[in-house]
Structures are given as C-alpha cells and as structure tokens.
Amino acid sequence: MKKKLLSVVLSAAMVSGILAGCGEAAPAANDAAAPAAEASEAAPAEDTAPAEAGSGKVYLLNFKPETDEAWQELAATYTEQTGVPVTVLTAADGQYSTTLQSEMAKSEAPTIFNIGNATAAQTWDEYTYDLKDSALYNHLTDKSLTVEYNGKVAAVANCYECYGIIYNKTILGDYCTMDNAVVSSIDEINSLDTLVAVAEDINNRVDEINEQFGYELTEAFASAGLDDGSSWRFSGHLANMPLYYEFKDDNVDLIAGEGEITGKYLDNFKKVWDMYVNTSEADPMTLNSGAYNAETEFGMGEAVFYQNGDWEFSALTNEENGYTVTADDLAMMPIYFGVDDANEGLCVGTENHWAVNAKAPQEDIDSTLAFLEWVITSDEGRDAITNKMGLSAPFDTFTGDYASNNAFAACAGEYMANGKTSVAWSFNATPNVDDWRADVVAALTAYTTGSGDWSAVEKAFTEGWAEQWKLAEEAANN
C-alpha cells in the first residue's frame, strides 16, 4: 500500500488459472490446476477474424455504467475495421429496466440487451433470439451460464462475477499485530460476530492505528450510500443474503425463487446493516444524499472494509484514479451473515446476460452476432473485457494474456478450492427489480435516519416482494 505518511479474490474449471493472491498469502495452485494454467499460457486462443460483418447495424444497450467508456471505444474500433455502425447506450444506475422498456418501443430498438434472469426472459420472450447455434454459446466454458426459457437459449452470460466484503489486507494485517486486537490473524475473521467485533474495535481505534502505522484511516467500513448510485449494493447484493438462505431452507430454486417470502433472516440483514452504518464516519442522516463515495474512501486508505464486487478491482488499481491502495493490498471475504458462516464462500454469479433482439431486421441480427463474436475473439475485444472493464469472461477464448488477473476473482476460487459454498445470486429472482428495490431503500433510509422502524423494512421486503411478483406475472401474461 502506498502510505501517505511513511512514503508510504464460478466453477472450479473457470477459476483454476487464477487461484492466487487472496488473504494474507497467495496459495499455491493445486496440482490438477497447474497443467491447465500452463497450457493456456502456452497456447492462448488465436485472434480470429470476425464472422462476416454483414450489412446491418448494431445497437448495444449497456447494463453496466462503469464500462461505458470501454464500450464506446470498442464500438468505434469495430466500426473503423468493418464499416458496421455500432451504437452504445448505457443506462443510468438503477434505471436499466425503465430504459430498456423505452428503447424497445422505438423503431430503432437495441439489437443487444441485458437479461438478468428467467423472469426477465419471460417478459421479453418475443424479443429474445435463440442463441444455441451462436459463437457466444459455443465458446462458453460452462453451458449453465445461460438463461433458458421457452425451449431456447434466450441469453448468454457475458461475465461472471463475485462480491463480498473487500478489505485492505495491509491495514487489517497491521491491526492484527496491535496490542489487544480482537484477532491476531485475518484468518480468524470467519463469522459475523467476529467481523462486527473487529470493525467496532478498528473504528474506535482509528487514531491509534494511524499513529502506529502511518495511515490516514477515518473509519472501519466505507460509507453505505443509499443514493441511486450506491443503494443497489444493499437492496440487491446484501438483500441477496436473506433470500439465499430462505430459499435454501425451503428447497426453492436459488435462482428462480418464488412469489412469497417470509423474511426469516431479516434480523441478520439488520445486524449487518447496523455494522455498516455504526462503524463508518458517514452521517446516517445523509446516506441518501449522494455526498459519499465509498470507492474513493476505500481507495484512499480511509476505510478497511467495503462491500462490493470484483468489478471494483479495475477501478481501485487504475493509477489514473490516484488511489493509494495497490493490487497487493486487495482481498475479499464473504458477507458473513450469522447463518452458516463456517461454510460460506463469496457470492458468485451474474445478472449480466447478452440477449439479441429477435424482432430486429435479419441483417441487424446477423451483424450483431458477428460483432459479439468479434468481441470475445479479437485482441481488442478481449483486452477491453479483461483489462479495461476488469471483468472475468466465461469464454474459452480468454486465456493467456486475456485471462483474468482480478485478485477478487482469485479469492472466490480460493474459497471454492477450500470447500466453501459459493452463495448463489438469488436476487436474480427479484420481481420488477427497480420498483422492489426502491421501496426497500426508502424503508431502509427511514429506519437509518430514525424516521421509521425496522418493521417497515420487513414489510417492504416481504409484502413488497409478493406484490411485485404478482404484478410481474400479470404483465407477462398480458
């Protein structure tokens, strides 16, 4: 870590080549994984020419705002090489569903759009082109990374991600050496109760830590922003935890979900949320103001913990951002939830699946399929996905120089290799996702500011889920 005052971490097949760098020391790759990794280095996928670009046009409605710049550059490069016009529109945070509905109603509708789950595939069934014979599907390393609906491959995953609690292992490791520290090793942080105790102790000893080690720490956890640009971390990713464990208890499909939930684990949600708020410097009264930037706080070494995903690796290690953290400082632990902490791994999955608009003119469909093939086979496309967007791609073409170097993805692989169970992305079953999340955030904000109580959060979570599920089914059937 660059200290200002002292000069100062999927399936096993997908992660075998990146099992390194998580926690206090990088684990050695196991013997079974080593030959595969060596082979990929020795024989990276060839830079193949794109399929016939065709005479159509391509319009990508991008789901991830943080990748907009890279997609704009990639689109321009492809147009320059082939003459095929490629348009990229990136939806604002939390506005994808609304933007998609609006754009699909236009005569010049997107030819590529995002499908998050089977519910969305049902909603957009008439618009999803069967990708079973596409290069995208053929190059998938794991054919389960698709959304299948109505007898067709409606969408194919374009990245595979993990999330949990990002932590600065340099600062946390130094804390562990202090007198009266709650733990003497990062490895001892393996339960919610322990994490809460560590976070509270760090937050209470910020000045002592800074004086002893030369940091500029201000808080244990980075701010838990409830504005539109940040609240999805909690109404989506943290909310996944009670959904996952409830579905698991009831033998419900962890991804498809069901129309009614009881909220049996919302007390655990509350305990984690209270930890986030109470061990941060951010004012609970203004968390929805948009005044906080948790990435910057963590990146500048002001916070030890930050709930987010592996997509943050690229931003945190981009020298142009001026952050003081380095790749060597970064690791990720599970969002310990007080249910099955001993066996819990990171949250692994995706809500990012490319779908191709079946109602587009055939020439546009052909050009769109050619463009997507180029993205996952060309040097330019693979470099953009891996190095500029910082994503872990689920295609067999991403080997050698284009294999993920994401330390957080490595953490996911290490937890899996150690027998931990990855937490499925059960929030993919969320009905009318934007509306449900907005209601949860409103109730969570009221609770946090003291103008409401926790029962309102529980009501928004459970009764709101049932209502939005019903509305989604009615819309799909009309």
Image (cartoon, rainbow, N blue to C red):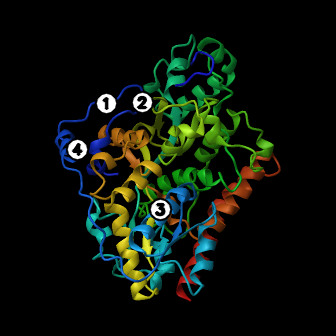
Earlier-in-chain disc, 4 versus 3: 4
Q: Residue at x 26, y 63 (%)?
A: 48
Question: Any mark on residue 276, and which?
Answer: none
Q: Disc 2, disc 3: CB below 8 Å?
A: no
Query: Where 180 falls versus 198 (above or below)?
Result: above
Q: Is mark 4 on a helix, strand or loop?
A: helix
Mark 1–mark 3 distance (CA, rounded to whole Å):
29 Å
Task: Return the residue at label 4.
Answer: 41
Q: Is residue 210 left or right of residue 75?
A: right
Q: Is disc 3 placed on a helix, strand or loop?
A: loop
Q: Which residue is drawn at 47% across and 70% down?
A: 115
Question: With respect to residue 388, does 372 lie above or below?
Answer: below
Residue 23, numbered label: 2
Which corner quadrant holds the C terminus?
Answer: bottom right
Residue at which label 1 appears: 27
Q: Which amino acid does label 4 sit on?
A: Glu
Q: Which of marks 2 and 3 is nearer the N terminus?
A: 2
Badge 2: how crowded within 10 Å, few (<14), some, or many (20+)?
many
Nearest the eye: 144 or 183:
144
Q: Earlier in the sequence, mark 4 or mark 1?
A: 1
Q: Tell me if I can see residue 456 in this picture.
A: no
